[in-house]
Amino acid sequence: MIQQTKTENQTIGLGKKLAKNFKGGEVIILTGQLGSGKTVLTKGIAQGLKSKNIVNSPTFVLMKIYQTARPPIKQLVHIDCYRLPDPDQLAAIGITEYFNRPDTVTIIEWGEKIKSLLPKKYLTIKIEILKNNLRKITVK
């Protein structure tokens, strides 16, 4: 699936739309350059999962967990690997325990940096910045 968005609200709306199809256990890798909208898309997914939390980038803390209210999904785990020097740091804090849990959706920004830790099955969402603020969002 390929979508284009031009505004932050459209990207959030796409995140909400994607979240409607989640059943729990999804691991999602977000790729794209800095400022492409990975965290904005995550905000939309969180809203689609009925989280009341304010979602922001976990760049400096590596991981944040948001409670959700859309059964069977109880939590959204949001990870940012941008500043991660070593994937073993995430392994040490138990990140793999969240993968594929039926009550959890896991979103990993810059997930390509931790390929060795990822489960065999995951969804990749690539966000590209085109001209005039247009974003091309590819889900595979």
Image (cartoon, rainbow, N blue to C red):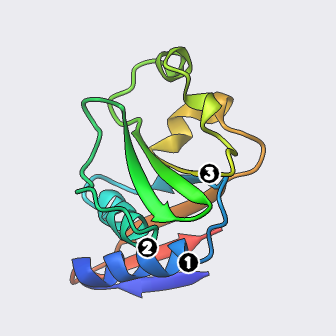
Looking at numbered disc 3 in the image, what kind of residue is underneath it? Answer: Asp
x 64%, y 55%: residue:
26
Residue 73 image point, x, y percent: 57, 58
Quarter of the view holding residue 39: bottom left
Looking at numbered disc 1 in the image, what kind of residue is underneath it? Answer: Lys
Q: In the rendered structure, which disc, 3 or 2, sits on the residue that comes first in sequence?
A: 2
Q: In the rendered structure, which disc, 1 or 3, sits on the residue that comes first in sequence?
A: 1
Task: Answer whether labels 1 and 3 touch (C-beta < 8 Å).
Answer: no
* Number of other residues with Cα within 10 Å of mark 3, as a class: few under 14, some 14 to 19, many 20 or more: some
Nearer-the-camera pick, 98 or 36: 98
Q: Is residue 118 left or right of residue 77?
A: right
Q: Quadrant of the N terminus?
A: bottom right
Task: Answer whether labels 2 and 1 touch (C-beta < 8 Å).
Answer: yes
Nearer-the-camera pick, 42 or 129: 42
- Mark 1 sits on what residue? 20
Q: Is residue 80 left or right of residue 96?
A: left
Q: CA distance from mark 3 to mark 2?
A: 15 Å
Q: CA distance from mark 1 to mark 3?
A: 15 Å
**Dot 1 lies on which element?**
loop
Quarter of the view holding residue 140: bottom right
Nearer-the-camera pick, 130 or 138: 138
